[in-house]
Image (tube, grey):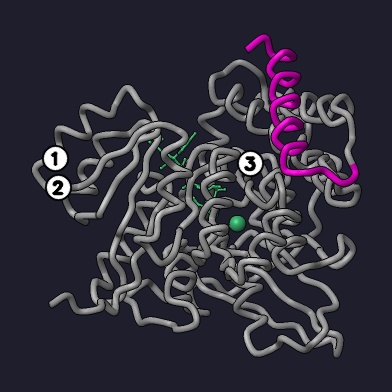
Amino acid sequence: MHQPSMQKRIAIFGSTGSIGTQALDVIAANPTLFSAEILTAQQNEQLLIEQAKRFRPNMVVIGDPNKYTIVKEALDPLAIKVFAGVAALEEVAALDCYDQMLAAIVGYAGLRPTLAAIRNRKSIALANKETLVIAGDIVMQTAFENKVPIIPVDSEHSAIFQCLVGEVHNKIEKVILTASGGPFLGKKTNYLVNVKKEHALQHPNWSMGAKITIDSATLMNKGLEMIEARWLFNLKPSEIQVVIHPQSIIHSLVQFHDGSIKAQMSLPDMKLPIQYALAFPNRIGNQFPRYDFKSVRHLTFEDPDVKTFRNLALAMEALEKGGNLACVMNAANEIVVFAFLKNRINFLDMTTIIEKTMQRIPFIQHPTLEDYFESDAAARNFAADQINL
Ligand code: NDP
Ligand code: MG
Protein backbone atom coordinates (compact mmCIF):
# COMPACT_ATOMS: atom_id res chain seq x y z
CA MET A 1 0.00 0.00 0.00
CA HIS A 2 1.18 3.53 -0.73
CA GLN A 3 2.49 5.15 2.44
CA PRO A 4 2.14 8.91 2.73
CA SER A 5 5.64 10.32 2.40
CA MET A 6 7.11 12.72 4.94
CA GLN A 7 9.18 14.25 2.18
CA LYS A 8 8.20 17.69 0.99
CA ARG A 9 7.87 17.50 -2.79
CA ILE A 10 9.65 20.48 -4.33
CA ALA A 11 9.00 21.85 -7.82
CA ILE A 12 12.17 23.67 -8.87
CA PHE A 13 11.34 26.14 -11.62
CA GLY A 14 14.75 27.03 -13.03
CA SER A 15 16.59 23.94 -11.75
CA THR A 16 19.58 24.43 -14.07
CA GLY A 17 20.44 27.90 -12.76
CA SER A 18 22.61 29.06 -9.91
CA ILE A 19 19.78 28.90 -7.35
CA GLY A 20 18.28 25.74 -8.89
CA THR A 21 21.51 23.73 -8.76
CA GLN A 22 22.20 24.83 -5.19
CA ALA A 23 18.66 23.84 -4.22
CA LEU A 24 19.33 20.37 -5.64
CA ASP A 25 22.45 20.21 -3.46
CA VAL A 26 20.22 20.96 -0.44
CA ILE A 27 17.74 18.26 -1.51
CA ALA A 28 20.55 15.74 -2.08
CA ALA A 29 21.87 16.43 1.42
CA ASN A 30 18.41 15.93 2.98
CA PRO A 31 16.77 13.03 1.13
CA THR A 32 14.41 12.16 3.99
CA LEU A 33 13.04 15.71 4.07
CA PHE A 34 12.79 16.71 0.41
CA SER A 35 12.30 15.25 -3.03
CA ALA A 36 12.52 16.95 -6.42
CA GLU A 37 9.10 16.48 -7.99
CA ILE A 38 9.33 18.86 -10.95
CA LEU A 39 12.42 20.29 -12.64
CA THR A 40 12.42 22.94 -15.37
CA ALA A 41 15.02 24.54 -17.65
CA GLN A 42 14.89 26.90 -20.60
CA GLN A 43 17.58 25.67 -23.01
CA ASN A 44 20.15 23.66 -21.04
CA GLU A 45 18.69 20.27 -21.90
CA GLN A 46 21.86 18.34 -21.06
CA LEU A 47 21.95 19.52 -17.46
CA LEU A 48 18.20 19.00 -17.13
CA ILE A 49 18.56 15.40 -18.32
CA GLU A 50 21.47 14.80 -15.96
CA GLN A 51 19.50 16.25 -13.03
CA ALA A 52 16.42 14.17 -13.91
CA LYS A 53 18.47 10.95 -14.08
CA ARG A 54 19.88 11.66 -10.65
CA PHE A 55 16.82 13.03 -8.83
CA ARG A 56 14.08 11.06 -10.63
CA PRO A 57 11.39 13.77 -10.63
CA ASN A 58 7.83 12.99 -11.64
CA MET A 59 8.12 15.43 -14.56
CA VAL A 60 10.35 17.97 -16.27
CA VAL A 61 9.70 20.97 -18.50
CA ILE A 62 12.10 22.23 -21.14
CA GLY A 63 11.18 25.77 -22.17
CA ASP A 64 12.67 25.57 -25.66
CA PRO A 65 10.28 23.36 -27.65
CA ASN A 66 13.05 22.45 -30.12
CA LYS A 67 14.71 20.45 -27.37
CA TYR A 68 11.66 18.39 -26.49
CA THR A 69 12.64 15.28 -28.47
CA ILE A 70 16.14 15.08 -27.00
CA VAL A 71 14.80 15.31 -23.44
CA LYS A 72 11.89 12.95 -24.13
CA GLU A 73 14.11 10.25 -25.62
CA ALA A 74 16.60 10.50 -22.76
CA LEU A 75 13.98 10.28 -20.00
CA ASP A 76 11.42 7.92 -21.53
CA PRO A 77 13.11 4.78 -20.17
CA LEU A 78 12.80 6.26 -16.66
CA ALA A 79 9.08 7.01 -17.10
CA ILE A 80 9.69 10.69 -16.34
CA LYS A 81 7.04 12.88 -17.98
CA VAL A 82 8.40 15.55 -20.31
CA PHE A 83 6.71 18.80 -21.34
CA ALA A 84 7.95 21.71 -23.44
CA GLY A 85 7.18 25.35 -24.17
CA VAL A 86 6.21 28.45 -22.25
CA ALA A 87 2.59 27.43 -21.61
CA ALA A 88 3.72 24.11 -20.07
CA LEU A 89 5.38 25.98 -17.19
CA GLU A 90 2.04 27.42 -16.09
CA GLU A 91 0.18 24.17 -16.72
CA VAL A 92 2.61 22.15 -14.65
CA ALA A 93 2.55 24.78 -11.86
CA ALA A 94 -1.23 24.23 -11.70
CA LEU A 95 -0.91 20.47 -11.04
CA ASP A 96 -1.41 18.95 -7.63
CA CYS A 97 1.62 16.62 -7.48
CA TYR A 98 3.97 18.89 -5.51
CA ASP A 99 3.97 20.74 -2.17
CA GLN A 100 6.17 23.78 -2.69
CA MET A 101 7.48 25.72 -5.66
CA LEU A 102 11.01 27.06 -5.60
CA ALA A 103 10.60 30.00 -7.99
CA ALA A 104 14.14 30.20 -9.42
CA ILE A 105 13.52 31.23 -13.02
CA VAL A 106 15.27 34.50 -13.84
CA GLY A 107 13.33 37.60 -14.87
CA TYR A 108 9.80 38.24 -16.12
CA ALA A 109 9.46 34.62 -17.28
CA GLY A 110 9.05 33.61 -13.63
CA LEU A 111 5.90 35.68 -13.04
CA ARG A 112 3.20 33.58 -14.70
CA PRO A 113 4.27 30.15 -13.37
CA THR A 114 4.61 31.61 -9.86
CA LEU A 115 1.15 33.15 -10.03
CA ALA A 116 -0.22 29.81 -11.27
CA ALA A 117 1.35 28.05 -8.26
CA ILE A 118 -0.12 30.63 -5.87
CA ARG A 119 -3.58 30.20 -7.37
CA ASN A 120 -2.99 26.46 -6.97
CA ARG A 121 -2.41 27.09 -3.22
CA LYS A 122 1.18 25.93 -3.24
CA SER A 123 3.63 27.50 -0.87
CA ILE A 124 6.33 29.51 -2.63
CA ALA A 125 10.04 29.73 -1.88
CA LEU A 126 10.71 32.89 -3.86
CA ALA A 127 14.08 33.56 -5.46
CA ASN A 128 12.62 35.26 -8.55
CA LYS A 129 12.45 38.82 -7.18
CA GLU A 130 11.28 40.18 -10.54
CA THR A 131 7.86 38.61 -9.85
CA LEU A 132 7.34 41.09 -7.00
CA VAL A 133 8.99 43.99 -8.79
CA ILE A 134 6.64 43.64 -11.75
CA ALA A 135 3.32 42.99 -10.01
CA GLY A 136 3.96 42.87 -6.26
CA ASP A 137 0.53 44.18 -5.26
CA ILE A 138 -1.34 41.56 -7.29
CA VAL A 139 1.02 38.72 -6.36
CA MET A 140 0.78 39.44 -2.62
CA GLN A 141 -2.99 39.93 -2.78
CA THR A 142 -3.39 36.63 -4.63
CA ALA A 143 -1.18 34.91 -2.04
CA PHE A 144 -3.26 36.43 0.77
CA GLU A 145 -6.54 35.32 -0.81
CA ASN A 146 -5.25 31.79 -1.32
CA LYS A 147 -3.58 31.67 2.13
CA VAL A 148 -0.25 30.91 0.49
CA PRO A 149 3.00 31.69 2.31
CA ILE A 150 5.70 33.42 0.25
CA ILE A 151 9.03 32.59 1.86
CA PRO A 152 11.92 34.64 0.54
CA VAL A 153 15.10 33.02 -0.77
CA ASP A 154 16.89 36.27 -1.61
CA SER A 155 19.49 36.45 1.17
CA GLU A 156 18.52 39.95 2.38
CA HIS A 157 14.84 39.11 2.54
CA SER A 158 15.53 35.77 4.16
CA ALA A 159 17.51 37.70 6.78
CA ILE A 160 14.59 40.08 7.39
CA PHE A 161 12.13 37.18 7.45
CA GLN A 162 14.31 35.39 10.02
CA CYS A 163 14.56 38.57 12.13
CA LEU A 164 10.76 38.83 12.12
CA VAL A 165 10.10 35.33 13.45
CA GLY A 166 8.30 35.80 16.79
CA GLU A 167 7.72 39.52 16.13
CA VAL A 168 4.32 39.44 14.37
CA HIS A 169 2.70 42.06 16.58
CA ASN A 170 5.71 44.32 16.91
CA LYS A 171 5.96 47.43 14.82
CA ILE A 172 8.84 47.75 12.38
CA GLU A 173 10.48 51.18 12.25
CA LYS A 174 12.59 50.29 9.24
CA VAL A 175 14.43 47.51 7.49
CA ILE A 176 18.03 47.96 6.45
CA LEU A 177 19.06 46.07 3.34
CA THR A 178 22.76 45.40 3.11
CA ALA A 179 24.56 45.50 -0.24
CA SER A 180 28.09 44.33 -0.99
CA GLY A 181 28.52 47.22 -3.42
CA GLY A 182 29.56 44.82 -6.19
CA PRO A 183 32.84 44.81 -8.14
CA PHE A 184 32.82 48.57 -8.78
CA LEU A 185 32.38 49.83 -5.24
CA GLY A 186 34.07 53.22 -4.87
CA LYS A 187 34.44 53.72 -8.64
CA LYS A 188 33.20 56.82 -10.43
CA THR A 189 31.52 57.46 -13.78
CA ASN A 190 34.79 58.01 -15.69
CA TYR A 191 35.80 54.47 -14.70
CA LEU A 192 32.42 52.84 -15.28
CA VAL A 193 32.16 54.06 -18.85
CA ASN A 194 34.96 51.67 -19.83
CA VAL A 195 34.14 48.54 -17.84
CA LYS A 196 33.73 45.32 -19.78
CA LYS A 197 31.28 42.55 -19.12
CA GLU A 198 34.06 40.16 -18.04
CA HIS A 199 34.88 42.52 -15.19
CA ALA A 200 31.25 43.21 -14.31
CA LEU A 201 30.66 39.45 -14.08
CA GLN A 202 33.30 39.10 -11.34
CA HIS A 203 31.29 39.54 -8.16
CA PRO A 204 33.52 39.80 -5.06
CA ASN A 205 31.37 37.70 -2.67
CA TRP A 206 28.68 35.74 -4.51
CA SER A 207 28.65 33.38 -7.48
CA MET A 208 25.32 33.87 -9.26
CA GLY A 209 23.62 33.81 -12.66
CA ALA A 210 24.73 36.39 -15.25
CA LYS A 211 21.69 38.70 -15.01
CA ILE A 212 21.75 39.19 -11.24
CA THR A 213 25.55 39.56 -11.31
CA ILE A 214 25.25 42.51 -13.70
CA ASP A 215 22.39 43.88 -11.59
CA SER A 216 24.72 43.70 -8.59
CA ALA A 217 27.43 45.61 -10.45
CA THR A 218 24.99 48.42 -11.39
CA LEU A 219 23.23 48.35 -7.97
CA MET A 220 19.95 47.71 -9.81
CA ASN A 221 19.81 44.50 -7.81
CA LYS A 222 19.52 46.49 -4.59
CA GLY A 223 16.82 48.65 -6.13
CA LEU A 224 14.87 45.55 -7.16
CA GLU A 225 15.34 44.28 -3.61
CA MET A 226 13.93 47.47 -2.07
CA ILE A 227 10.78 46.95 -4.14
CA GLU A 228 10.75 43.24 -3.27
CA ALA A 229 10.98 44.15 0.45
CA ARG A 230 8.18 46.69 0.10
CA TRP A 231 5.76 43.97 -1.03
CA LEU A 232 7.01 41.04 1.03
CA PHE A 233 6.89 42.91 4.33
CA ASN A 234 4.20 45.51 3.54
CA LEU A 235 6.51 48.48 4.11
CA LYS A 236 6.36 52.12 3.12
CA PRO A 237 9.20 53.30 0.86
CA SER A 238 10.50 55.49 3.70
CA GLU A 239 10.88 52.40 5.90
CA ILE A 240 13.47 50.79 3.61
CA GLN A 241 17.12 51.83 3.81
CA VAL A 242 20.15 50.52 1.94
CA VAL A 243 23.61 50.34 3.45
CA ILE A 244 26.79 49.17 1.74
CA HIS A 245 28.43 46.40 3.74
CA PRO A 246 31.25 45.01 1.58
CA GLN A 247 31.94 41.90 3.68
CA SER A 248 28.43 40.43 3.09
CA ILE A 249 28.31 38.90 6.58
CA ILE A 250 25.25 40.77 7.85
CA HIS A 251 22.56 39.90 5.33
CA SER A 252 20.08 42.57 6.46
CA LEU A 253 18.63 44.12 9.61
CA VAL A 254 15.28 45.06 11.11
CA GLN A 255 14.84 48.02 13.44
CA PHE A 256 11.77 47.83 15.70
CA HIS A 257 9.87 50.74 17.22
CA ASP A 258 11.75 50.41 20.50
CA GLY A 259 14.97 51.14 18.59
CA SER A 260 16.25 47.57 18.90
CA ILE A 261 17.93 46.24 15.75
CA LYS A 262 18.07 42.54 14.85
CA ALA A 263 20.47 41.24 12.21
CA GLN A 264 21.03 37.87 10.59
CA MET A 265 24.63 36.89 9.93
CA SER A 266 26.51 34.10 8.19
CA LEU A 267 29.10 33.62 5.50
CA PRO A 268 27.68 34.45 2.06
CA ASP A 269 26.30 31.15 0.79
CA MET A 270 22.91 30.96 -0.95
CA LYS A 271 22.42 27.36 0.17
CA LEU A 272 21.56 28.67 3.63
CA PRO A 273 18.57 30.88 2.65
CA ILE A 274 17.47 28.21 0.14
CA GLN A 275 17.53 25.55 2.84
CA TYR A 276 15.76 27.87 5.29
CA ALA A 277 12.95 28.55 2.82
CA LEU A 278 12.48 24.85 2.04
CA ALA A 279 12.57 23.74 5.69
CA PHE A 280 10.69 26.69 7.27
CA PRO A 281 9.62 26.83 10.08
CA ASN A 282 12.39 24.38 11.01
CA ARG A 283 16.11 24.85 10.86
CA ILE A 284 18.08 21.85 9.70
CA GLY A 285 21.70 21.04 10.44
CA ASN A 286 24.37 21.25 7.77
CA GLN A 287 28.11 21.30 7.23
CA PHE A 288 28.30 24.72 5.52
CA PRO A 289 31.41 26.70 6.55
CA ARG A 290 30.72 28.89 9.60
CA TYR A 291 31.39 32.57 10.06
CA ASP A 292 34.23 33.09 12.51
CA PHE A 293 34.94 36.52 13.98
CA LYS A 294 38.64 35.71 13.66
CA SER A 295 38.46 35.43 9.87
CA VAL A 296 36.48 38.61 9.17
CA ARG A 297 37.07 40.97 12.10
CA HIS A 298 35.95 44.23 10.54
CA LEU A 299 32.38 44.72 9.47
CA THR A 300 32.04 48.09 7.75
CA PHE A 301 29.10 50.19 6.56
CA GLU A 302 28.76 53.13 4.18
CA ASP A 303 26.10 54.95 2.20
CA PRO A 304 25.42 53.85 -1.38
CA ASP A 305 26.65 56.27 -4.06
CA VAL A 306 23.37 56.86 -5.90
CA LYS A 307 24.89 59.69 -7.97
CA THR A 308 27.30 57.28 -9.64
CA PHE A 309 25.12 54.16 -9.53
CA ARG A 310 22.01 55.84 -10.86
CA ASN A 311 20.08 52.62 -11.35
CA LEU A 312 19.55 52.59 -7.61
CA ALA A 313 18.14 56.13 -7.74
CA LEU A 314 15.81 55.09 -10.58
CA ALA A 315 14.58 52.11 -8.58
CA MET A 316 13.99 54.38 -5.58
CA GLU A 317 11.88 56.61 -7.82
CA ALA A 318 9.89 53.57 -9.02
CA LEU A 319 9.43 52.44 -5.42
CA GLU A 320 8.20 55.88 -4.41
CA LYS A 321 5.83 56.41 -7.33
CA GLY A 322 4.40 52.88 -7.46
CA GLY A 323 1.91 51.99 -10.21
CA ASN A 324 3.46 50.32 -13.25
CA LEU A 325 6.78 52.18 -13.00
CA ALA A 326 8.75 49.33 -11.41
CA CYS A 327 7.35 46.93 -14.03
CA VAL A 328 8.51 49.28 -16.81
CA MET A 329 11.92 49.72 -15.18
CA ASN A 330 12.34 45.97 -14.77
CA ALA A 331 11.48 45.28 -18.41
CA ALA A 332 13.93 47.91 -19.67
CA ASN A 333 16.56 46.55 -17.30
CA GLU A 334 16.17 43.00 -18.63
CA ILE A 335 16.67 44.30 -22.17
CA VAL A 336 19.73 46.42 -21.38
CA VAL A 337 21.43 43.77 -19.26
CA PHE A 338 21.00 41.31 -22.11
CA ALA A 339 22.42 43.89 -24.55
CA PHE A 340 25.37 44.62 -22.26
CA LEU A 341 26.10 40.89 -21.99
CA LYS A 342 26.11 40.78 -25.81
CA ASN A 343 28.56 43.73 -25.91
CA ARG A 344 25.96 45.86 -27.69
CA ILE A 345 26.01 48.78 -25.24
CA ASN A 346 28.35 50.05 -22.56
CA PHE A 347 27.85 49.94 -18.81
CA LEU A 348 26.44 53.46 -18.47
CA ASP A 349 24.14 53.14 -21.49
CA MET A 350 22.13 50.71 -19.40
CA THR A 351 21.03 53.48 -17.04
CA THR A 352 20.33 55.98 -19.83
CA ILE A 353 18.02 53.58 -21.64
CA ILE A 354 16.18 52.50 -18.49
CA GLU A 355 15.59 56.14 -17.56
CA LYS A 356 14.31 57.03 -21.04
CA THR A 357 11.97 54.04 -20.98
CA MET A 358 10.60 55.03 -17.58
CA GLN A 359 9.90 58.51 -18.93
CA ARG A 360 8.31 57.28 -22.14
CA ILE A 361 5.91 54.48 -21.18
CA PRO A 362 2.57 55.87 -19.91
CA PHE A 363 2.26 55.80 -16.15
CA ILE A 364 -0.66 53.81 -14.70
CA GLN A 365 -1.35 54.38 -11.01
CA HIS A 366 -3.51 51.28 -10.42
CA PRO A 367 -2.61 48.67 -13.04
CA THR A 368 -4.45 45.41 -13.59
CA LEU A 369 -2.45 42.27 -14.33
CA GLU A 370 -3.17 42.84 -18.03
CA ASP A 371 -1.81 46.40 -17.67
CA TYR A 372 1.39 44.98 -16.20
CA PHE A 373 1.77 42.54 -19.10
CA GLU A 374 1.20 45.36 -21.59
CA SER A 375 3.53 47.77 -19.81
CA ASP A 376 6.22 45.10 -19.77
CA ALA A 377 5.85 44.48 -23.51
CA ALA A 378 5.78 48.21 -24.37
CA ALA A 379 8.86 48.90 -22.24
CA ARG A 380 10.76 46.00 -23.80
CA ASN A 381 9.96 47.24 -27.32
CA PHE A 382 10.94 50.80 -26.53
CA ALA A 383 14.19 49.83 -24.81
CA ALA A 384 15.10 47.39 -27.60
CA ASP A 385 14.49 50.15 -30.19
CA GLN A 386 17.02 52.34 -28.39
CA ILE A 387 19.65 49.67 -28.97
CA ASN A 388 18.45 48.56 -32.41
CA LEU A 389 18.07 45.03 -31.05
P1 NDP B 1 20.39 31.69 -13.65
O1 NDP B 1 20.51 32.49 -14.87
O2 NDP B 1 21.60 31.02 -13.09
O3 NDP B 1 19.26 30.56 -13.83
C1 NDP B 1 18.02 30.87 -14.37
C2 NDP B 1 17.16 29.63 -14.51
O4 NDP B 1 15.95 30.00 -15.17
C3 NDP B 1 17.78 28.52 -15.35
O5 NDP B 1 17.28 27.28 -14.93
C4 NDP B 1 17.26 28.86 -16.75
O6 NDP B 1 17.26 27.75 -17.62
C5 NDP B 1 15.86 29.31 -16.42
N1 NDP B 1 15.34 30.27 -17.42
C6 NDP B 1 16.01 31.29 -18.00
N2 NDP B 1 15.21 31.96 -18.85
C7 NDP B 1 14.01 31.34 -18.80
C8 NDP B 1 12.78 31.55 -19.47
N3 NDP B 1 12.62 32.53 -20.36
N4 NDP B 1 11.75 30.71 -19.21
C9 NDP B 1 11.90 29.70 -18.31
N5 NDP B 1 13.05 29.45 -17.64
C10 NDP B 1 14.09 30.27 -17.88
O7 NDP B 1 19.73 32.64 -12.53
P2 NDP B 1 19.93 32.62 -10.96
O8 NDP B 1 19.78 31.24 -10.43
O9 NDP B 1 21.12 33.41 -10.60
O10 NDP B 1 18.69 33.51 -10.50
C11 NDP B 1 17.36 33.02 -10.50
C12 NDP B 1 16.47 34.04 -9.78
O11 NDP B 1 16.87 34.07 -8.40
C13 NDP B 1 16.61 35.47 -10.31
O12 NDP B 1 15.38 36.10 -10.26
C14 NDP B 1 17.58 36.12 -9.33
O13 NDP B 1 17.37 37.51 -9.20
C15 NDP B 1 17.22 35.40 -8.04
N6 NDP B 1 18.30 35.35 -7.07
C16 NDP B 1 19.46 34.71 -7.37
C17 NDP B 1 20.51 34.66 -6.48
C18 NDP B 1 21.76 33.90 -6.79
O14 NDP B 1 22.62 33.77 -5.91
N7 NDP B 1 21.94 33.37 -7.96
C19 NDP B 1 20.42 35.35 -5.18
C20 NDP B 1 19.15 35.97 -4.94
C21 NDP B 1 18.13 35.97 -5.85
P3 NDP B 1 18.56 27.42 -18.56
O15 NDP B 1 19.67 27.06 -17.62
O16 NDP B 1 18.12 26.29 -19.40
O17 NDP B 1 18.84 28.69 -19.31
MG1 MG C 1 19.97 39.52 -2.65
Which of the two discs, 1 and 3, labels the residue nearer the N terminus?
1
Residue 254 lies within the magenta run: no
Query: What is the magenta range?
Result: 365-389
Q: Which residue is mark 3?
A: 215
Q: Is residue 336 left or right of residue 238?
A: left
Residue 173 placed where, x, y %? 85, 78
Report if the beta carbon of the residue with label 2 is closer than 8 angstroms to ligand 1. Answer: no
Instruction: Determine the main secondary structure of the stretch shown in magenta.
Output: helix
In the rendered image, the vertical position of residue 249 relative to residue 163, given as above or below: above
Residue 111 placed where, x, y %? 59, 45
Work out whether residue 292 or residue 294 is closer to the camera in this orientation and state it: 292
Q: Which residue is mark 1?
A: 76
Work out whether residue 77 or residue 240 is closer to the camera in this orientation and state it: 77
Residue 317 placed where, x, y %? 88, 45
Which quadrant holds residue 177?
Answer: bottom right
Q: Are marks 1 and 2 in contact (CB under 8 Å)?
A: yes
